[in-house]
Image: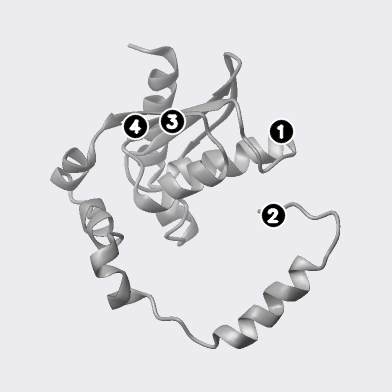
Amino acid sequence: MNKYMRMAINEARKGIRNGDGGPFGAVIVKDGKVIAKAHNQVIKNSDATCHGEMMAIHKASKKLHSFDLSGCEIYTTGEPCPMCLSALLWANISKIYYGCNVLDTENIGFRDAKFYELSKAEHRNELVVELDRKACLKLYEEYRKIKDKTPY
């Protein structure tokens, strides 16, 4: 077994034993060094965004003092949901290793497959509606004029 996946499993086990959330642990590694370990804390924090991968990104970013995690890899016990996958991509994680897939996760009662389906283009207009674009474009224009900014 891969040592980093073993750490992710142990982290997930710690979380479920504490009643923090589901069996999802994550470890972020850079240049062979563990940068962050985290687990699902949705129940503990009463926050739907506190997935293991999200918590690991928060810890790694804080430790590295950067939102850019280029060169980092993540080991996670479950295939990242659309939210986590997007966050991992925004953070520039170089490689994602996962243990259980979406169907495995569904088999233990989670509904990740539903969110993959809803994120497809044909369902987008059911959930997402453009509103007050002109006013928001003015805001974007203000931001565009700021010098020395990072477009993140």
> What is the C-alpha distance between the residues marked 4 and 2?
31 Å
Q: Are there few (<14), some (14-19), or many (20+) residues within 10 Å of tag 4?
A: many
Q: Are there few (<14), some (14-19), or many (20+) residues within 10 Å of tag 3?
A: many
Residue holding disc 2: 151
> What is the C-alpha distance between the residues marked 1 and 2?
19 Å
Residue holding disc 3: 11
Tell me what residue is drawn at x 49 percent, y 42 percent.
88
Pointer 2 with pointer 3, Cβ within 8 A: no
Tell me what residue is drawn at x 81 percent, y 68 percent.
145
Q: Earlier in the sequence, mark 1 or mark 3?
A: 3
**The label number, if any, that marks residue 64 in the structure image:** 1
User: Is label 1 or label 2 in front?
Assistant: 2
Tell me what residue is drawn at x 70 percent, y 78 percent.
139
Q: Given the current orientation, which residue lies at the most extreme right position?
A: 147
Q: Are there few (<14), some (14-19), or many (20+) residues within 10 Å of tag 1?
A: few
**The label number, if any, that marks residue 77 in the structure image:** 4
Instruction: Work out whether residue 40 or residue 143 is closer to the camera in this orientation and state it.
Output: 143
Q: Earlier in the sequence, mark 4 or mark 2?
A: 4
User: Is label 2 or label 3 in front?
Assistant: 2
Circle 1 SS class: helix
> What is the C-alpha distance between the residues marked 3 and 4?
9 Å
Q: Specify whether 13 is left or right of 74.
A: left
> What is the C-alpha distance between the residues marked 4 and 1?
23 Å
> What is the C-alpha distance between the residues marked 2 and 3?
33 Å
Q: Earlier in the sequence, mark 4 or mark 1?
A: 1
User: Is label 4 or label 2 in front?
Assistant: 2
